[in-house]
Image (cartoon, helix red, strand yellow):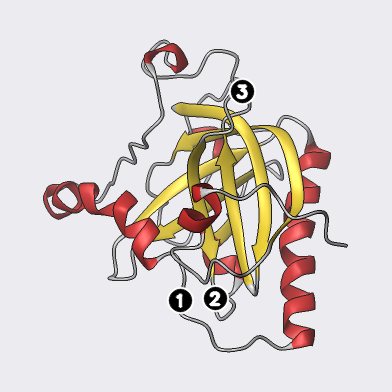
Amino acid sequence: MLNKPSAGGNSSSEATGGLDDDSIEYVLLNKPECYVYNVPPSTRGRGHKAGEWTNCIWRGRLQVAAKGPVLVIKFVDASTGDLFAACPIAPDTPIDRVVERTVDSSRYFVLRLSDGSGHHAYLGVGFEDRNDAFDFNACLYDFDRQRSQMGSPSVPTPGAAGQKDLINPLREKARKGEGKVTLRLKGLSAAHKRDGHELTGAPSVTTTAAQP
């Protein structure tokens, strides 16, 4: 069931990559706390392992919203309401192409961000509570199923502009790099960093496998 439309503003417009502003945005899920990580490249065929994530770069509120047939995953500062990052999912894009579970824990996911021209970056997302992780996953697939049953009109692919702004600064590094793109998002202040950019208060993530 859809909740009330969220208080709009530039955040929703940016999150949907410039999709028609007349579309009403509905909040489907709100989780007061999640953790965002830099994600190392996965080994081909092995998938991503949360136990290998050692760099927590942000902590805040996760919101899943729908604007027309477009699903948007947002990361919002719990104190200021500022948008840290957004990940739109077009109606013709399978959920599992954008959101992937880690192979070693049910509480962690990987989001795949694309600028529409073949360049990608990845964010790790984790929850302390396994129920929050279940709710997040269920929300995505419930909306996708309802959208498929209703049929989605053809709409421009969202996120090409908004995500390009996020990915473009990384292109040069991606061309030079050793197969790894380090995502640096705006809004990360020095107060969020500790011990090599690990966020204060973040759940301990070591090289040992996370608990499933």
Residue 206 seen in the figure: yes
Local packing at callout 3 (Cα closer than 10 Å; few below 14, some 14-19, many 20+) is: few
Q: Are marks 1 and 2 in contact (CB under 8 Å)?
A: yes
Please state which of residues 93 and 178 is positioned toward the viewer in this rendering: 93
Residue at image mark 3: 79
N-terminal of the pair, mark 2 or mark 3, is 3
Pick whichever of labels 1 and 3 is earlier in the sequence: 3
Q: Nearer the viewer, residue 6 or 108?
A: 6
Disc 1: CA contacts within 10 A as few (<14), some (14-19) or many (>=20): some
Measured as percent of width and height from the top left, residue 124 is found at 52, 42
Residue at 54% from the left image edge and 73% from the top image edge = 90
Identify the residue position indicated by label 2 in the image: 93
Q: Residue 39, image x and y in percent?
A: 43, 41
Tell me the amino acid under the disc marked 1: Thr
Number of marks in picture: 3
Type of amino acid under label 3: Ser
Tell me the mark number nearer the camera, choosing from 1 and 3.
3
Q: Quadrant of the N terminus?
A: bottom right
